[in-house]
Image (cartoon, rainbow, N blue to C red):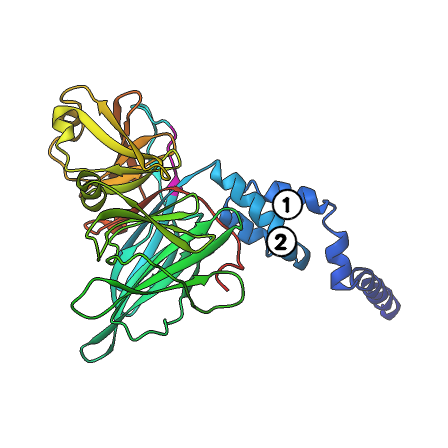
Amino acid sequence: MKKRRKTVSEDRLTITQRNARPENERENSSPHIPVDQTIDIVSRLQAKSVAACRCVSKLWGSTLRLPHFNELFLTRSLARPQLLFAFQKHGRFCFFSSPQPQNPDENSSPIVANYHMRLSFDGVFCEMSESIHGLVCLIYTKEISRGRTETVPVVCNPSTGQSLPLPKLTTKRVKVISYLGYDPVDKQFKVLSMTRRHENAWECGEHQILTLGTGEFSWRMVECRISHDLPRKRICIDGVLYYPATDRSSRDCMIVCFDVRSESFKSIIVVEDVYRAALDGYLIDYNGKLGLYECDFDWFFDGSLELLVLEDAEKQVWSKHTYLFPPNLWKDIVGTAEVHFVGVTRTNEVVFWIERMMPSCLLYCNIERKTIVRVALHGLEAGKNRKVYTCLDHVENVNLELLL
C-alpha cells in the first residue's frame, strides 16, 4: 500500500512539474494565433468584448493596447455607428448605447439600449457635449465656498468606463466654459476653455487649451484676436469648432471657427438671418459641412423643412435646402406628443426624441424619401421623466491611454 501510494505521489509530482513552466513561456506558447490575426479578429468585436480579451493574458493585454489596434478598432467602429444616451439620476450620470438604425422603415424592429457606465458628481449638472470620436465632455457646477461656485469639465469614454476631471484653469475670471474638439490629422483630442472677463459681462477673456493623451496634463494659453462674446453652443466638424458669436467691437454677427490642429481662430461674417438660425436653432454636421436648422416645429404642419449649409467657408457661401413632406404626415404619426430635436445622421435623416412615452421612441425623418418612421427604444426605463441626452453616430473608442 505504501509503495502504491508512493508511486501515485511520484506520478502526480511528475505531472505537476511538466505543467509548471514559467508563466511568460505558457503565455507565448498557448495562443497559437499570430499577433496580426489576433488584432484583426478582436477589432471586429464590441468594446465590452475587447475589455474581456485584454484580460486573457499579459500578451493579449499588451497587444490590444497597441496604437495600431486602437486605430483599426476605431475605423471599424465608424462603420457600425451607435446611439449614445445619457441622463442624470440621484447625483449620477448614466450612459447607455444601442445600435443605430440604418434607413429604418415601418417594419423596423425595436432597438435595445445597453448600460455602459455611471459617473458620480458633487454639484449641479449643466450640459453634455456631442459625442466626438467616442468621447464626451460633461460640465457641472460645484460649490467651493459659501456663495462661490466653479465649473468642472469632465471628459468621459463610455466604451472603457473611464472619466477624467480636467485640471483647474489658472485664472481669476469668474466664468469658464470648455469645449471638446478632435484633430483628424494628428488624431488628437483637445479641450478649448474660455473665460468671462467679469461678473456682469459676457465678453471672452482668456483662451486656454489642453491636449489629451500626451502625458502633459496642463493648460496652455492660445491667442484669439477676435473680440467676441462667450459662445452658447458649438459643434466640431472635421477638426474645426464652430460657434455663433457677435463681435464686441463692430457688433457684427459671425460664426467663429477654431482650427483644432493649428489652434487658431478666424471668423465668418454672416447676415442677421443666418446668425439667428445659428443662435436660436441647431448646429449640425451636414455631409461634413456646417449646417443650421431652425426648429420650432411649424414645418411639420405645413410640410416643409429648411436647412442652411456652409458650402465654402473662405468665400462665405451658404446654400438653402427646402424639403417638402406629405401633408398631415407628422400629425398622423406623432399626434400631440412633445418632441425634441436630436440631430441629423450621416445618411441625412433628421432624428427627434419623443418626450414622455414608454417605451421611448425616436423619429427618423428621411428628407430624401420624404418619410417619417417611429422606432421604439427599450432599456431606458430608468430615465423616465428625465432629460435624456442623445448622440447620433457615436463610435466606440477603446484607447485606454487617452484619459490617463
| Viewer-closest of 309 and 252 | 252
Is 207 displayed left or right of 387 in the figure?
Answer: right
Q: What amino acid is at disc 1?
A: Ile
- Determine whether 72 is above or below 372 in the image: below
Residue plotted at (40% across, 70% down): 167
- Determine whether 152 is above or below 316 in the image: below
Furthest-right residue in this view = 3
- Determine whether 253 is above or below 201 in the image: above
- Dominant SS type (magenta): loop
Which residue is identified by label 1?
A: 39
Residue plotted at (23% across, 43% down): 278
Q: Is residue 89 visible?
A: no
| Viewer-closest of 246 and 154 | 246
The question of residue 31 being in magenta is answered with no
Q: Position of residue 305 (x, y in %)?
A: 21, 28
Q: Position of residue 5 (x, y in %)?
A: 83, 67
- Determine whether 333 is above or below 291 in the image: above
Chain part drawn in magenta? 98-102
Callout 2: SS: loop
**How many angstroms separate mark 1 from mark 2 (CA)?**
9 Å
Callout 1: SS: helix
Furthest-bottom residue in this view = 146
Q: Which mark is residue 119?
A: none
Q: Is residue 128 visible?
A: yes
Residue plotted at (25% across, 60% down): 126
Which residue is identified by label 2?
A: 66
**The quadrant where residue 316 appears:** top left
| Viewer-closest of 288 and 5 | 288
